[in-house]
Amino acid sequence: MPRIRIFSTKNSLKWIKKVELLSIEPCNFEFTIYDSLAHLKEIFIENIHQVDGILFSGQIPYFYIQQHFSDIHIPMLHFDVTQEDFYRTLSEYIYKHKDFQMNRCLVDFLYEENNYLGIYDWVEKDDAPYIFDLSMQAYADMDVYNKMRDFHVEMWKQNKVDVSMTRLGNLQEMLEPYGIKPVLVVPSEQSMINIIESLLKEIQLIQLIENQVVIAHLEMAINRDNVADLEYRQMSLHKAILDFSKNNQMSFIIHRNAFYYEIITNYSDFKLITNEMKNCQLASFLTQELQFPVHIGWGVGHSIQEAQLNAEKAAQMCAALETQAYILSKEETLIGPLGDKDWIKVDTQYDLEIEKLSVKLNTSPLQIQKIIAVMDKLQSNTLASEDLSIHLGITTRAANRILKKLEEHGAATVSTQLQKKLRGRPKKVYEIHFDKQ
């Protein structure tokens, strides 16, 4: 059963509690009351553990949290007043108050982004109600409640309005000392159902993604002629994988081959292990536990076969004589080496222009894509052999060969840069110009 945390002010809790009676898919609703936006900011993080989704009683807390916690990946939505809700409440008020004048009314939840709830479709500009601000951006202000209260009070003092309509439950209490009783407009039950159903769809989508299969391909650097060494490394790596799984309370499916291991896990655990694809805890653990390097390739795919193939390709990118990890996503983006400040992101998808360039330069498409990724990383098309060596995890000699080959085929122009220190030879650099091929 999905767990949904609802953040609400005390004054909005009465209508918020209706969610427990709605005809919707069974949910476990949990309620958290906040006194102010500063209080909400203070308690937000500690109240979202182990929940599947988050709802806010209105747009102001929703905008505020999005502004201050943009890295939260839990699905979040807010209840809102629809056009139907607004006109239902307005019609009821007009029916009871025959002397009502639209141009002497203040409505504090009309703005450009919600098309002013269609108010200008049926009233002339001179007959339209007063509004708080033209844009919803004004509602992300920490002091918006007080500013809105002051705006209502000032309009009443100037005798410009006879009626205040608000979306904010706590504004009723804030205006009471001034003798103002605003009309509170809240979402209808159907509006609430629509928002909750939208949130549940987002939760279900994320759960599908979180449960998709991810495969890690672990290759050992071994001497195939030394059987004893091979058996030792197989047993050591297997034990280390089991220890990592146990220490992190993760369930892996482990497949053993003579020269590599496969770990099958889910996307949720994969994100934890790789810290949202930034560094690899498994690689760090194996570096500490083993006396030999392991090349780790993480593969994400639309199927097990695709994930396996991507994992193998990613493992082949680990060229350094140390334990490293790369990722190849289902979008065919290569990321790595994880945990290294010099990591690169390579788009490996088929590209006709890259293929043509590959033939012309007698260089693999992946090699060209990796060089482009290094240039993107450095924001420069001028590279030295050290740049390729560092970012591709290859030797300086191998990097020199790659750049020399590009020069020979007319895709690079060689020049020199003076060293920062006066001693030593000038540094040879290459200006890459794939676009001129």
Image: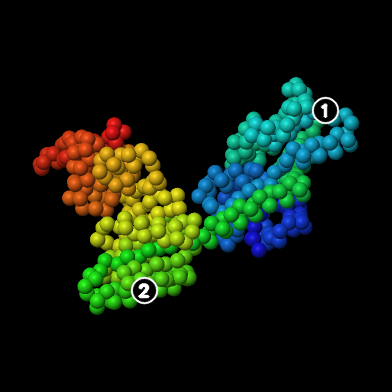
Secondary structure under the numbered disc 1 in the rendered image:
loop
Quadrant, the N terminus: bottom right
Q: Residue at x 73, y 31 (%)?
A: 118
Task: Count residues near mark 1 (Cα–Cα under 10 Å), then give few for <14, some for 14-19, many for 20+.
Answer: some
Query: How far across and down, in percent of the image, does residue 71 sit?
Result: 50, 50
Pick the front one: 22 or 164: 22
2 and 1 marks in contact (CB < 8 Å): no
- Residue under label 2: 238
Q: Which mark is residue 101?
A: 1
Q: Residue at x 24, y 36 (%)?
A: 411
Q: Quadrant of residue 18?
A: bottom right
Quadrant, the C terminus: top left
Badge 2 amino acid: His
Query: How far across and down, in percent of the image, does residue 256 sit?
Result: 38, 72
Is residue 205 visible in the rendered image? The answer is: yes
Pick the front one: 346 or 341: 346
Query: How far across and down, in percent of the image, does residue 33 sit?
Result: 66, 54
Q: Which mark is residue 330?
A: none
Q: Residue at x 60, y 50 (%)?
A: 76
User: Is residue 236 toward the left or the right of residue 400 in the image?
Assistant: right
Is residue 386 visible in the rendered image? The answer is: no
